[in-house]
Each structure stands twice: as structure tokens, then as C-alpha cells.
Amino acid sequence: MAQILDLKGTSISSLQIEKAGVRLKNATGDLQVKNSADSAFTKVTASQFETTNDIGLVINSDAAGSAADWKITVARPSSGMTANYTLTLPTSAGSPSQVLTTDGSGNTSWTTSSGGTANGQLVDTTSLAFNSASSVSMFTLPANAIVHRVEVIIDTSWATGTATMTVGVSGTTAKYAGSNLIDLYGTAKDIYVSTPGETANGSAESLIITYAASTSTAGAARVLVYYSNPG
């Protein structure tokens, strides 16, 4: 069986790993990984990727640098760091106008921005449909914030069944609005209001709508939460 003793200056344009494996190629000093047919790029899977300089991770659809192919680079500071750290991304893409915040230990989450105004009243809106699956994520209420008012606005009345909903948090699903205060079968443009009167919570809370769809075949509503940020 033939063996390749020295790849430097070889006449072949690529090195194939196994008979039907991927190909390693040189492209003007850059390493390319292509499929076995050498017709398209293929993924590289590893438990960890590490760069040895401050350039960082470059994301680019191809080698071009114009139009829709401008690259994105994620890089570390070139100086000033005093320790290693890890940033863990949230479990979802968040909601419009939310910002990425950290708990100080590298765990990030989406938070509704106060716009820089302490104690200013804010409002977050979440849509609910007749076929939504429980529970419906709303937003993260900041630590020490106070919920002043919850409004449920019926856009399309629910049809059939006995659907119900509450607004609260995991473990206390009706903390901010109970099912007895909301009639999903009311008339369109009906507004149901809850003023919970809860004291500020020292920790951030992930608000949810706990929804029971029953046999509903139509229905749509908006849930508005009015709250003030800590000063």
C-alpha cells in the first residue's frame, strides 16, 4: 500500500481523508474543506474551536467582500482583560426592542430596555392566539420592578370550548392576573384589567401566559403589562 511521506510540493490538488471522505485543499495559503466530490464546502465539526490571536472568529458566506457577502468578525479585546470568561447566550431570539443583559456570571438574557429612565412606566405587549400552546413566554421583568396593571384586549372573540388564561410566573401562574378576571369569549375590543398590587420582587421574573386552549377554533388577544423599573 502506497504511503505519502511528505506532502510538501505534492502534485495533487487536494488530500482526501478515506476513500469517500472530505478533501483538504490549499487556496492561496488558506485551508479549505470540501466534500468528497470536491464540488462544495462541507462543515467542520469539533468539540472546541480556538484562535491564537486577537483577530477572532470571522463569519462570511464566501470569499467575497462586497454586497451581501461582507464578513462579520467576533473578537476579544486586544488588551485589558484580567481573566477568562464565558458568555452563554439566551435560549431564544428575544422580542422586539429587548436588549441583551448579563447576570454578572456570563449568563445572558433578553430584557426590555427602560430607555435609560429610572422609575418611568413601561409597557410590554404579548400576542395570544386561540391555538397557542401553553405556556406563552412574555418578557423578563427586571429585579425590583413593580407591575401596576395588566390589560387583556380581545381582538377576536374566542369560539367554542372553554379556553382560559392567566398571567404570572412559573409556579405562581396567576400572580398578576387570574382566569376569573378575563373572559376570552367577550366581545371584540373588550378590555379586562388587573391591578395586582404585588410588592417588588428582588429577582428578575420571566412572565408567562398560562393558557388552556380547550376546543377553541378562533380567537386573538393582546396582553399589555404596565410596570415601572427600579430607580
Image (cartoon, rainbow, N blue to C red):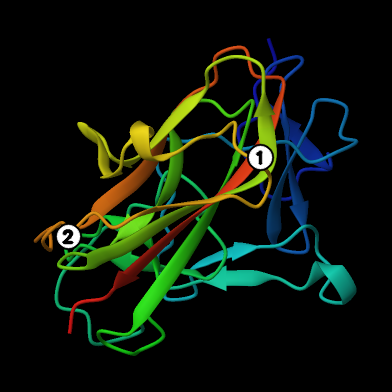
Q: Amino acid at mark 2?
A: Ser
Residue 53 drawn at (x, y percent):
42, 72
Left or right: 122 with respect to 201?
A: right
Numbered disc 2: secondary structure = loop
Residue shown at 18% from the left, 59% from the top: 197
Residue 4 drawn at (x, y percent):
65, 29
Residue 72 drawn at (x, y percent):
64, 70
The quadrant in which the C terminus is found is: bottom left
> Dot 2: within a 10 Å radius of its alpha carbon, few (fewer than 14), some, or many (20 or more) residues?
few
Residue closer to the observer: 13 or 46: 46
Residue shown at 81% from the left, 75% from the top: 65
Left or right: 116 with respect to 157?
A: left
Vertical placement of 131 versus 229: above or below? Answer: above
Q: Which mark is residue 220?
A: 1
The quadrant in which the N terminus is found is: top right
Residue shown at 76% from the left, 43% from the top: 10
Residue 229 drawn at (x, y percent):
26, 76
> Dot 1: within a 10 Å radius of its alpha carbon, few (fewer than 14), some, or many (20 or more) residues?
some
Q: Which mark is residue 164?
A: none
Q: Amino acid at mark 1?
A: Ala
Q: Say whether residue 113 is visible.
A: no
Residue closer to the observer: 212 or 109: 212
